[in-house]
Amino acid sequence: MEETNTKDGTDTMDNRDTTVDAFTRALLDVDRLAARQVMEQRGRDMRPIQFAEKVVLPALERIGAGWQDGSLALSQVYMAGRICEELIDEMLPPADPSRKNQPKMAVCMLEDHHTLGKVMVYAVLRAGGYDLLDYGVVSVDDLVDRVKTDRVEVLLISVLMLPSALKIQHVRQQLIDRGCEVTLIVGGAPFRFDDQLWQSVGADVACENASDVIPAIEKMMNMEEKR
Ligand code: B12
């Protein structure tokens, strides 16, 4: 059975499932206090990013599946998302004061209002010592204008809807047309469902989790140095 990196090494999948159950229940009851209690209890032996990825993400996926099969209302999905947003904001650490020597970076959601993935990517990078611009929700044209003006070298795009993911190819094409050499790192549910999608929309890298972003950027920087 898979183990997580806990202090005493006792966090089995069963433990984690119980935590996901308790957290999901709290979200569906719109019980912020109970959700926070689960977070605080698990926070003793899980790093914040682990909690976000191993508990928050599966709980929201379960709730999303409930909405798809008609057993839950969109309002429940919405409130669950809002509570998670507040908790993630609170638990992910603030910026590391020692900023890294790094390429100019920006993160955005492309015509998509599913904010949690982007919030996590931004927080992980800031906590890891990277500085980056946060464009929020942008359209293709607006994004390309801003990337050009800000001379962005690495662009991180988060999308959760397939139509938004497909728009990334227009971003890539416009960047080429306007002579911008930009590394595109993408993430979000459509890329988890289809592992070839990132290539077909012209991205350079796809990350499954927010915590994969730092290794991806480091690898990219090492490759640049060797050129
Ligand atoms: C919560 C939720 C909502 C909430 C959003 C609340 C909020 N403030 O974010 C609300 C209720 C508002 C909502 C609305 C809608 N939703 Co919705 N929603 C979800 C749900 C259940 C969970 C999404 C989520 O927050 N997950 C948790 C976060 C943390 O996960 P994540 O974003 O994937 O991020 C992780 C990784 O992907 C990665 N990552 C993400 N981005 C990036 C980027 C980079 C650079 C990197 C490195 C990593 C990375 O890091 C994170 C983990 O570490 C999903 C179901 C699902 N399976 O994803 C549906 C889902 C995304 N929604 C869907 C739909 C259709 C909608 C609506 C159109 C519904 C409607 N009819 O109105 C609207 C559209 C809103 C809009 N215009 O954007 C569909 C999309 C289908 C599709 N294929 O296109 C899904 C898949 C549900 C489904 N199965 O049908 N939704």
Image (tube, rainbow, N blue to C red):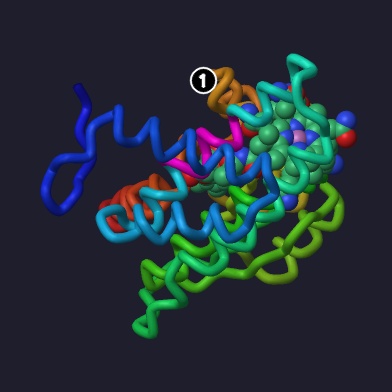
Q: Identify the residue at image location x=77%, y=54%.
A: 144
Relative height, residue 49 to residue 53 (above, below)? below
Residue labelled with disc 1: 195
Residue 187: x, y in percent? 56, 39
Say if residue 127 shows up in the picture. Answer: yes
Q: Identify the residue at image location x=38%, y=54%.
A: 214
In the rendered view of the protein, which quadrant contains the N terminus?
A: top left
Relative height, residue 103 to residue 137 (above, below)? below
Dot 1 crowding, Cα within 10 Å, few <14, some 14–19, many 20+: few
Q: Identify the residue at image location x=59%, y=45%.
A: 26
Q: Main secondary structure of the magenta part?
A: helix
Residue 224: x, y in percent? 35, 54
Residue 211: x, y in percent? 40, 49
Q: Identify the residue at image location x=34%, y=83%.
A: 98
Span highlighted in magenta in the image: 54-61
Q: Is residue 33 left or right of residue 49?
A: right
Say if residue 110 shows up in the picture. Answer: no
**Quadrant position of residue 197:** top right
Q: Is residue 157 left or right of residue 214?
A: right
User: Viewer-proximal residue, 183 or 45?
Assistant: 45
Q: Is residue 15 left or right of residue 166?
A: left
What amino acid type is highlighted by mark number 1? Asp
